[in-house]
Structure formats: structure tokens, C-alpha cells
Image (cartoon, rainbow, N blue to C red):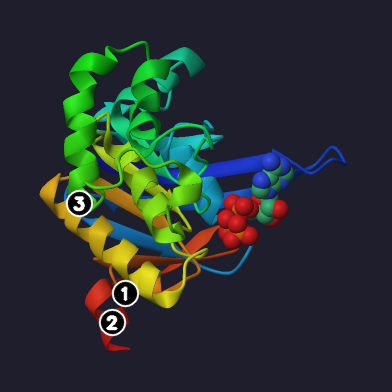
Amino acid sequence: MSLELTDVVLTYPDGDGARITAVDGVSAAVPRGRLVGLTGPSGCGKSSVLSVAGTLIAPDSGRVEVDGIDVTDLTEEERAAVRRTRVGFVFQHDNLLPSLTALEQVLLPVHIAGGRPASARSHARELLAEVGLADAMDRRPHQLSGGMRQRVNIARALIGDPAVLLADEPTSALDSHRAAETMALLTRLVRERDVAALLVTHDPRALAGADDVLSMLDGRVVDRSRGAVVRAG
Ligand SMILES: Nc1ncnc2c1ncn2[C@@H]1O[C@H](COP(=O)(O)OP(=O)(O)OP(=O)(O)O)[C@@H](O)[C@H]1O
């Protein structure tokens, strides 16, 4: 299993000396090559689950395994190393830097990690071609459509060949056509690159592409359905 959460509990301080339980005993498993959707009303704990899965926050209790590594008891520095080498993130907004070309955006994580951009360059080109941007590698964000910017974002999340891809509302800023295109692309990449993907979304258009869907309410998973059931319904 590439991503496994077992009985995860996460609380936050509520500002009055008490604590809010945002995630209340969530278990989820995502194998490689599968895309699992995580949905539910605002405030139910979806983003908190994603933050725990991405090792950004350590849970109060429970176990988190990323690419076969139990990260539960690792130090912050060790968790950051797992995150850097094994996890890719895609957010709702593309967070692209205005002055960089598409190719430079995809290479940015390599620069930040102190890697050798020269050897990563051909990999970045390949990824951009794979997301349909072979002819747009030298364009800056203002020269790209919303859907194209999101595809740069996806290529950037995959530059480190992560085992786990975490996506937070990747389609909600897109029109229906672009949303469908983005989901088709994500699903294809998850299969081809054998990545375990967890996708947080309110967007039924995005859930239609998921293999399985977990529905949350008040910090708990209250329903687990096969994607096919959601598609049929
Ligand atoms: N940093 C924080 N400090 C305190 N409480 C928080 C913090 N982050 C989230 N919460 C609370 O935890 C609960 C779960 O929030 P979370 O953002 O995980 O839900 P969500 O389902 O992703 O919501 P949305 O769909 O609106 O993004 C909410 O009650 C929220 O107010």
C-alpha cells in the first residue's frame, strides 16, 4: 500500500484552551495506480486528512504510512525528507510564479531540493509533453489558460517521481470542460506512473474519475463507495 492512514485523530486548539477534533479516527488506504476521492461538507476534515497524509501535520494519534515508510514517529526533518522525495501536491490554485516559464516552474522543486536541474531538464520536458504542453514550455503563466496552468501544476507535482500524489480541489477553479480534461489527465497519469492519489474535493465532476470515494462528516468517514457506483448514481 502506498498511502495508509490508520485510526488517525487530529485536534487543533480552539483558542479557548480546549481542542477541536478535526479528524476523528479516519482510516484510508490508497494503493499505487489508484485515485481515491475524499469528499464531504465544508469543515468535515478533508484538508486536515490531506495535511496528515502529506506529512505536513503529525496526528495526535494513529498511524501514517507513506510509500511503505511509517512516518508517525519521525522528526519534523525526517518527515520533510519523506515529503520532498515521495509526495507530490496539487492545489486548487496553481501557485505558479509569474516570471517563470512552464519549464522553469516544473524544475523549481528540483532547484529547491538542491538537485541538478541539467539532468532534470529532460525529465521536465517529458512531463510537460505528457500533460499536453510540449508547445507551451517557454510560456509564462499569463500566456497560459487556467487549464494549462493546472497542467503545469500537475507536471510540477510529478517531477520528483512521487509514490503519492495529493490533490486539494484541483478542478474547482475550472469550467466543466477544463475540469473534465484535468480529471482525465490526472487519472491517466495515476495509472501510467503508478502513483497513489488522494483527491480532496467538493466537486462531483472530479469524483466521477475516482476509483473509490470516501465521504466524511464531522471528522469521520461515513461512507465508502466504489467510483463506479458514484458514476452510475
Ligand atoms: N489550523 C486550524 N486551527 C484550528 N482549527 C482548524 C484549523 N484548521 C482546520 N480547523 C478546523 O478543523 C475542522 C476541519 O477543517 P478542514 O479544513 O480539515 O475541513 P474541510 O473539510 O477541508 O473544509 P473545507 O472544505 O471548507 O476546506 C474545521 O472545524 C476547521 O474549522
Q: Are marks 2 and 1 in contact (CB under 8 Å)?
A: yes
Q: Residue at x 22, y 22 (%)?
A: 120
User: Residue 218 sits in which quadrant?
Assistant: bottom right
Q: Which mark is residue 208?
A: 1
Task: Measure the alpha-carbon separation of dots 3 and 2.
Answer: 20 Å
Q: Picture coordinates of residue 129 (x, y %)?
A: 19, 45
The quarter of the rendered structure image containing the C terminus is bottom left
Instruction: Please state which amino acid type lies under the numbered disc 1.
Output: Ala
Q: What residue did someone put label 3 on?
A: 189
Mark 1 close to ligand 1, CB under 8 Å? no
Instruction: Please state which amino acid type lies under the numbered disc 3.
Output: Leu
Q: Picture coordinates of residue 82 (x, y %)?
A: 35, 23
Q: Is residue 142 left or right of residue 114?
A: right
- Please tell me which residue lies in front, 122 or 221: 122
Task: Measure the alpha-carbon separation of dots 3 and 1.
Answer: 16 Å
Q: What residue did someone put label 2 on?
A: 231
